[in-house]
Image: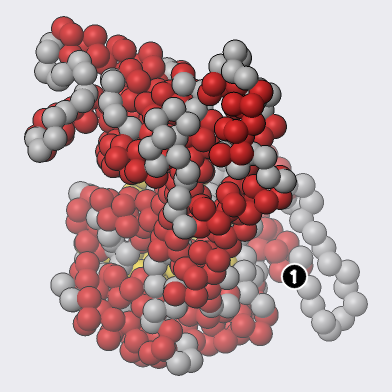
């Protein structure tokens, strides 16, 4: 792992809190989370639906729906630019240029009435002043880069003429058009067949290596985490509950939620039955005070009424957990 | 694209045939004897038989049908019962007025309706949205003859900006344009109501779509996200409502032409009704039906232009 300090990492987030307006009250859906991603590094953001993963990604991109969701505190720095302090034109200039994003649904994320080649090259016209013809030529190269067969002939094709896997390749080409330093992939393979998933992940890993991308990978699939991530960050109810290098995490999952997630993962070897996590995530308006996992936690006690700090695991400064029962003496 | 056009044109043939057959049957099943209508109820039986023979009404119904169809295919709509002039000539003389009124209204309806709908969706529940909704409600509630009279009172009688009678002298294009303003505003503003509603609801849906988020993620300016990425997808419902409204416009043009005293198909229809001129009425029904079929073809062809999925499927 690179020794580049966090402050100069392509993506660094400090104390990010994002709130959602429910009725007339703002509730924190992402609470005080901090992380950074270095070049060529993959940070996996893991958690079940509604834990704040996608909200974190949209906060970084500055794509939150304006009226009902907002970043209430913290700092997001992308390639040296403080996105939280910047005005909208500055953030607009960053998006698609120095930071790109791939979404979960390749079937609906491409515009059905615009040709593929135009959609891929559009960011180049916006950020690099390319002419239509130059953008088209570069779009062909990008489609070849993501291994879309017969790319030159398919520039004028429309999304409905592509399969799901091919559309996700187009999305990757689109996000990488301007050579961004940071790529956010929000469940990029969830909607795809398993065989196509592996191809898309391999392609992303390959491009990441070539382009030196910092990759923030959002997923709920621990199998994907184990195969492509360098570091992992587990979120529950808007809090980071555990973070660390991927090997340390799988060797010693420490937070009771991480343990439960791994126990809920299907395995081939052994004949242990699947262990679902009992109960469900409380809704945002009913989150308990203190540790938000306490309503489902097998080892909760009276200390959980206060949110525990992040503490190190087994003396490893990179592996940290947020649980009173796991605080080491 | 060419195959799509040819296919669409071919499917219009059975439609036109069905329309013409319906007109033929309708005219013959309406109660009343046309010879009495023309000669009056005091006419002798011999005079009526002679006229029936002259009009071809004495022939068997199937022969009449063949005559009717073969005439129409040649562009001949027969002769008017009241004036004995060729109907095709009468229709062609006023058709440009109705076409110009319809197209001008279409222009008013889309040029005002589309931006208003987009603005209303962008600033949902804001002033523009509130105004658009109120305007739409008023628009769908007003019949064309009421709004027409109100426009006349305000802009022609009180303000005197436009003539009360929208008949212009030949060879005066400016006068013809001025005469067109109020009638086309009357029809167009009613149309704005429908276009705004469809545009607004389409835009509200489109702005929430994933591909709009993708466009924002590319860093595109708001204006381009709205018009190039969201609105392009709303073109299909907008074209649909405009196409459907073309039929309504043709119907409302009749009322508007009467209120504003404009020459056109509408005034011709009223003349035909007043004179019980069955053959003229039949000819006008054929022309109107033909116009609606053409409007539908144009609408479908426009689909092919605005939605790539139509051509290839």
Q: Hey, which quadrant is residue A116 in on the image?
A: bottom left
Q: Residue at x 58, y 78 (%)?
A: A163
Q: Residue at x 90, y 77 (%)?
A: A271
Q: Secondary structure at mark 1?
A: loop
Q: Position of residue B226 (x, y in %)?
A: 33, 50
Q: Residue at x 69, y 58 (%)?
A: A256
Q: Chain of mark 1?
A: A
Q: Position of residue B275 (x, y in %)?
A: 46, 21
In-front residue for pair B8/B192: B8
In-front residue for pair A265/B5: B5
Judge from the rendering whether residue B179 lies leftward or rightward of residue A269; answer left or right: left
Q: Position of residue B8 (x, y in %)?
A: 53, 64
Q: Which residue carries the number 1 mark? A: A265
The answer to whether residue A131 of the structure is visible from this angle is: yes
Relative height, residue A124 to residue B109 (above, below): below
In-front residue for pair A157/B257: B257
Question: Count of labels shown?
Answer: 1
How would you rate the neighbour count of disc 1 (Cα within 10 Å): few for under 14, some for 14-19, many for 20 or more? some
Q: Position of residue A34 (x, y in %)?
A: 41, 58
- The residue positioned farthest toward the top in the image shown: B158
Relative height, residue B85 to residue A129 (above, below): above
In-front residue for pair B193/B225: B193
Q: Hey, which quadrant is residue B167 in on the image?
A: top left
- Quarter placement of the N terminus of chain A: bottom left
The answer to whether residue B91 of the structure is visible from this angle is: no
Q: Hey, which quadrant is residue B111 in on the image?
A: top left
Q: Residue at x 22, y 76 (%)?
A: A132
- Quarter placement of the C terminus of chain A: bottom right
- How are the residues colored? secondary structure
Relative height, residue B25 to residue A203 (above, below): above
């Amino acid at each position: 792992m690179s020794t580049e300090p966090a402050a100069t990492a392509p993506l660094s987030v400090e104390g990010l809190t994002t709130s959602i307006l429910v009725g007339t009250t703002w509730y924190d859906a992402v609470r005080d989370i901090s992380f950074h991603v270095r070049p060529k590094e993959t940070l996996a953001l893991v958690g079940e639906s509604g834990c704040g993963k996608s909200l974190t990604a949209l906060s970084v991109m500055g794509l939150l729906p304006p009226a009902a969701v907002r970043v209430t505190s913290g700092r997001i720095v992308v390639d040296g630019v403080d996105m939280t302090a910047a005005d909208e034109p500055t953030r607009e200039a960053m998006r698609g240029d120095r930071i790109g994003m791939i979404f979960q649904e390749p079937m609906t994320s491409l515009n059905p009435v615009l040709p593929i080649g135009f959609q891929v090259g559009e960011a180049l016209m916006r950020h690099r002043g390319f002419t239509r013809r130059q953008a088209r030529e570069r779009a062909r190269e990008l489609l070849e880069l993501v291994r879309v067969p017969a790319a030159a002939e398919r520039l004028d094709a429309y999304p409905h003429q592509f399969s799901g896997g091919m559309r996700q390749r187009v999305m990757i080409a689109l996000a990488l058009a301007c050579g961004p330093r940071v790529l956010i992939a929000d469940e990029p393979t969830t909607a795809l067949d398993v065989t196509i998933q592996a191809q898309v992940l391999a392609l992303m890993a390959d491009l990441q290596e070539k382009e030196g991308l910092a990759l923030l990978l959002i997923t709920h699939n621990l199998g994907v985490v184990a195969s492509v991530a360098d570091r992992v960050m587990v979120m529950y109810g808007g809090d980071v509950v555990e973070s660390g290098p991927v090997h340390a995490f799988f060797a010693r999952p420490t937070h009771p939620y991480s343990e439960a997630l791994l126990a809920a993962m299907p395995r081939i070897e052994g004949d242990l039955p699947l262990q679902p996590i009992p109960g469900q995530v409380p809704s945002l308006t009913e989150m308990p005070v203190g540790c938000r996992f306490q309503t489902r936690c097998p080892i909760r006690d009276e200390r959980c009424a206060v949110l525990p700090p992040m503490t190190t695991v087994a003396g490893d400064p990179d592996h940290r957990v947020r649980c009173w029962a796991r605080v080491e003496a | 694209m060419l195959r799509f056009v040819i296919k669409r044109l071919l499917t219009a043939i059975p439609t036109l045939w069905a329309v013409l057959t319906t007109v033929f049957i309708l005219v013959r099943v309406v109660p009343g004897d046309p010879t009495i209508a023309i000669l009056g109820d005091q006419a002798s039986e011999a005079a009526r038989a002679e006229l029936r023979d002259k009009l071809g009404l004495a022939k068997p119904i199937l022969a009449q049908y063949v005559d009717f169809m073969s005439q129409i295919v040649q562009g001949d709509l027969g002769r008017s019962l009241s004036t004995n002039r060729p109907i095709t000539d009468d229709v062609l003389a006023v058709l440009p007025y109705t076409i110009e009124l319809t197209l001008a209204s279409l222009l008013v309806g889309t040029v005002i309706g589309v931006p208003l709908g987009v603005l209303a969706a962008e600033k949902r529940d804001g002033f523009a949205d509130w105004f658009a909704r109120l305007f739409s409600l008023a628009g769908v509630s007003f019949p064309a003859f009421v709004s027409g009279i109100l426009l006349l009172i305000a802009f022609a009688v009180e303000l005197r900006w436009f003539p009360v009678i929208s008949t212009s002298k030949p060879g005066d294009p400016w006068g013809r344009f001025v005469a067109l303003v109020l009638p086309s505003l009357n029809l167009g503003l009613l149309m704005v109501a429908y276009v705004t509603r469809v545009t607004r609801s389409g835009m509200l849906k489109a702005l929430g779509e994933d591909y709009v988020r993708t466009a924002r993620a590319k860093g595109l300016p708001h204006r381009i996200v709205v018009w190039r990425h969201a609105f392009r997808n709303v073109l299909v419902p907008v074209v649909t409502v405009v196409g459907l409204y073309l039929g309504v416009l043709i119907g409302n043009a009749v009322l508007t032409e009467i209120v504003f005293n404009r020459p056109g198909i509408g005034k011709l229809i009223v003349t035909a009704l007043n004179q019980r001129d069955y053959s003229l009425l039949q000819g006008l029904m054929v022309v109107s039906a033909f116009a609606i079929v053409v409007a539908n073809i144009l609408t479908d062809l426009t689909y092919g232009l605005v939605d790539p999925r139509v051509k290839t499927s």
